[in-house]
Image (tube, rainbow, N blue to C red):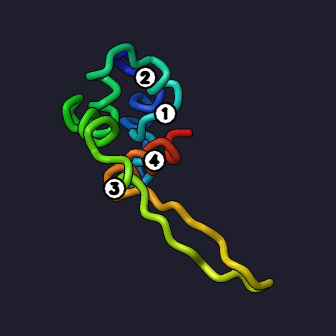
Amino acid sequence: MSSRGTSEILANMHPFPFITELLKMPTAEDFLELETANQVAAFFGKTYKEISEIFYQTPKKYKYRRFEVSKRSGGTRIIYAPNRKIKEIQQVLARVF
């Protein structure tokens, strides 16, 4: 990653704190510059060991919860909701991309 990105420079110049925080948020460019598994884990605020446990050591049946929701038109829709840890990672990705 670059030592001082555009977001950081702009964040230091802005007089409104909430804008400063928004500008400090990681960008898609920051993510794409990551080179190691440890850097990717740190991007999500986790260690490599934590990421590994979430995706590789958690049994499949605990990664997503299945439930059904009734449709207005009749029938049901099947929903697969991620567990809390996977959802946190997905939320970071959604903010970045």
Q: Which residue in the protein does label 1 denote?
A: 27
Report the residue at 23% width, 29% height from top.
48
Residues under numbered marks 2 and 1 in contact, where contact means CB atoms less than 8 Å apart: yes
Which image quarter holds the C terminus? top right
Residues under numbered marks 1 and 4 in contact, where contact means CB atoms less than 8 Å apart: no
State which tag comes first along the sequence, 4 or 3: 3
Q: Nearer the viewer, mark 1 or mark 3?
A: 3
Q: Which residue in the protein does label 4 denote?
A: 90
Q: Secondary structure at mark 1?
A: loop
Q: Secondary structure at mark 2?
A: loop
Q: Secondary structure at mark 3?
A: helix
State which tag comes first along the sequence, 1 or 4: 1
Residue sitting nearer the eye, 85 or 59: 59
Q: Which residue in the protein does label 2 denote?
A: 5
Q: CA distance from mark 1 to mark 4?
A: 14 Å
Instruction: Say left or right for 41 vs 10.
Output: left
Q: Secondary structure at mark 4?
A: helix
